[in-house]
Amino acid sequence: MASERFQALIDNSSDVISLVNAEGQVLYANASTAKVLGYHPEELLGSNGLELLHPQDRDNSVRTIRKVMEVPQSQNRMQARVRQKNGQWLWVESTACNLLDEPGVGAILLNYREIAARKAEEEERHRLTEELTRHNVELQAFAHTVAHDLSEPLRTISGFTELLVRNANLGAEDKELAQFIVQGVRRMSSQLNNLLASATTRFVDSLRPVDLEHAVVQAIQNLNESLTSSAAVVNVESLPTVQGNELDLIRVFQNLISNAVKYRGRTPAVIRISAELAGPDWIIRVRDNGIGISKENHRRVFGLFTRLHNMEVEGSGLGLAVCKRIVEGLGGTIWVESEPGLGSTFSFILAAEPLKISR
Ligand code: ADP
């Protein structure tokens, strides 16, 4: 009675269940074999199960079965394409269980089910990821070329306009107009530099230990003129060494400090730069006492060409987008906490340990 129940269970299982001997010969196949693969169970008896496998999946399956055969009662999983009776290939996932020393069985139990839908999804996901990576690379190369190629004519315009001002007998008004041209070209050139920075691909190989205190000093030196003329104060607390690219991290600090100066309130900017260890990461904070940013713009400010405040302040709307790109390229995140009139704190996370980044 019990054995009839078991037989009914096996016959009605939606999985294909079969027994093969150590040579791979099929000893038994259940009724589902006909539904899933199209073969009558009797047709398969005595045949070599491996011959039904796709040639590309055979070696892997043989390896898995050999491993299972080494240890009695052990089991292992594999995925393979099996030829159906109609000649089509069907992806199946199979579990092989070594019951060779089991009295009354003396075989390897193979249990497999169809996974065509799962495989199709996996393949589609893989295809989309590859396509996205290719598009990204193309887009970066395109932005890089455009920014690079446009810089050259800009240098020519500004060089010749400056020559004109120096050599020609221009009146005061014409000189002023020429000066506007030079200023406009400088602004555009700075925008292109930012665009170029945001399009540059960085590779994991270029990561080095970067002393953030040193990076901040460099950023402050680069901003010396605007910091001095606006009487800004920068307080730098003890900062760690992290894995990164020094020029990139200098740029992050430079953009954040220069924003703190540009978007200061009525009093001179007071900027505090600090670091806090949070588990395996460092949180770096750049706090200012400036005009602040309303909550609905906290995410927006990191977008390309986003500018919130008056256009009299010089800017491209790219500075924070570049910071975001650099920090995210290092596997971190960047965000702002701020309220209008109460200053802003820009924080970003960098890993304390060497990063493992997959691109
Ligand atoms: P840019 O300064 O060139 O306009 P950013 O991408 O650096 O571009 O900043 C985007 C916008 O976010 C700025 O135009 C400004 O409105 C706002 N912003 C950035 N930093 C601050 C800050 N520290 N305080 C207040 N507003 C800021």
Image (cartoon, rainbow, N blue to C red):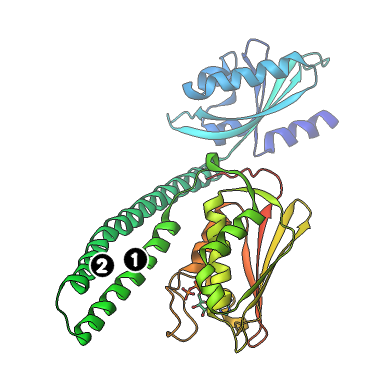
Residue ID for mark 1: 189
How many numbered markers are drawn? 2
Amino acid type at circle 2 is: Ser
Q: Is residue 202 left or right of residue 270?
A: left
> Front-most of 188 and 144?
188
Which is more toward the observer, 10 or 133?
133
Say which quarter of the image contains residue 254.
Answer: bottom right
The answer to whether 114 appears left or right of 142 in the picture is: right
Q: In the rendered view, would you say 41 is above or below 297?
A: above
Of the numbered discs 1 and 2, the one sitting upstream in the chain is 2
* Picture layout, residue 313 above or below residue 77: below
Outermost residue toward the top?
A: 23
Residue that badge 2 annotates? 158
* Left or right side of 160 for 144: right
Residue 1 in view of the camera: no
Residue for point 51% across, 17% down? 51
Check contact, mark 1 vs mark 2: CB within 8 A: yes
CA distance for labels 1 and 2? 10 Å
Q: Position of residue 140 (x, y in %)?
A: 39, 53
Q: Badge 1 local density, few (<14 within 10 Å), some, or many (20+)?
A: some
Q: At which x and y percent is residue 259?
A: 54, 74
